[in-house]
Amino acid sequence: MDANKLNYGKLAGLVVLAQQGDEHAFATLYAATVKNQLAFATAFLKDPRLAEDAVQEAYISLYKSLAKLKDPKTLVAYLNRINFNTCVNIKKKHQRISQELQSTQQEGHGEEGQNVLPQLPEYGDPARYYDDIELKNELSMAVDKLPDIKRAAIMMFYYQNMTIKEIAIALNCSDRTVKRQLSEAKNALRHQLLFGRF
């Protein structure tokens, strides 16, 4: 079950039941929304394990704060905001730990000769998909270089098909700010892809 199969009205009804302590209603909310939340977290964090951790933390936060949600129809936007903030926090924590490990290894305390390469997905026949994959990789790397707020806006708009209003609620900003962030992000991506730099 996903959020596309349950409209906002049905989700709102489940929120009301969950706020009254109905565990089954919360489980149904989870089942209806988790796929999109995990897709966003995976795209944002670029690590499936970190994404799973982020989504788990987001749903724990949702469970704890569900009683505070005044308008049950805003569940998806509320959950998107929680998930985005959780992803940002996990990313910062992961970067800090990575920097500390790198610093330790540079000081001679790490394992010598250790070669850590990123895991690359398999694409099948490289000759058949080379151009498409190269463009997707360039675009993905360009999106990764965007500031968090711009990257989140792009991912929510183009990958999750969220409206400007939903993104504004998720990012806790105005519709106008979302439009500006999307416009600036698209210009930065266009410049990066054409000229190789922002």
Image (tube, grey):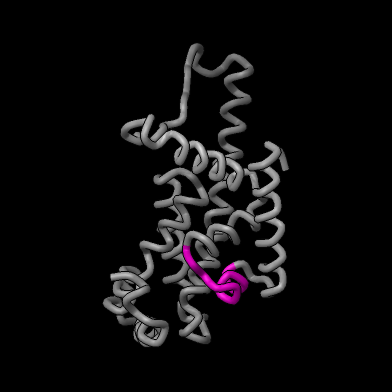
Pick whichever, 197 or 4, lies toward us.
197
- Where residue 78 appears, as percent x and y from the top left, is 52, 73
Extreme residue in the top direction: 113
Instruction: Indicate whether residue 149 is drawn in magenta.
Output: no
Q: For the point 57% across and 36% down, which residue is it? A: 97
- Where residue 175 appears, as percent x and y from the top left, is 67, 74
Instruction: Indicate whether residue 162 is drawn in magenta.
Output: yes
- Where residue 56 appears, as percent x and y from the top left, is 40, 58
Q: Is residue 176 left or right of residue 79?
A: right
Q: Main secondary structure of the magenta part?
A: helix
Q: Is residue 194 left or right of residue 89?
A: right
Pick whichever, 130 or 19, lies toward us.
130
Pick whichever, 2 or 139, lies toward us.
139
User: In the image, is residue 57 above or below residue 174?
Assistant: above
Label tally? 0
Which residue range is magenta in the image? 160-170
Q: For the point 59% across and 26% down, which residue is it? A: 102
User: In the image, is residue 120 above or below residue 77?
Assistant: above
User: In the image, is residue 143 above or below residue 134?
Assistant: below
Quarter holding the C terminus is top right
Q: Quadrant of residue 182?
A: bottom right
Q: Is residue 184 left or right of residue 158?
A: right
Pick whichever, 119 or 90, lies toward us.
119
Q: Quadrant of residue 49?
A: top left
Q: For the point 35% across and 34% down, which residue is it? A: 122
- Where residue 11 appears, as percent x and y from the top left, is 38, 81
Quarter holding the N terminus is bottom left
Q: Is residue 76 left or right of residue 28?
A: right
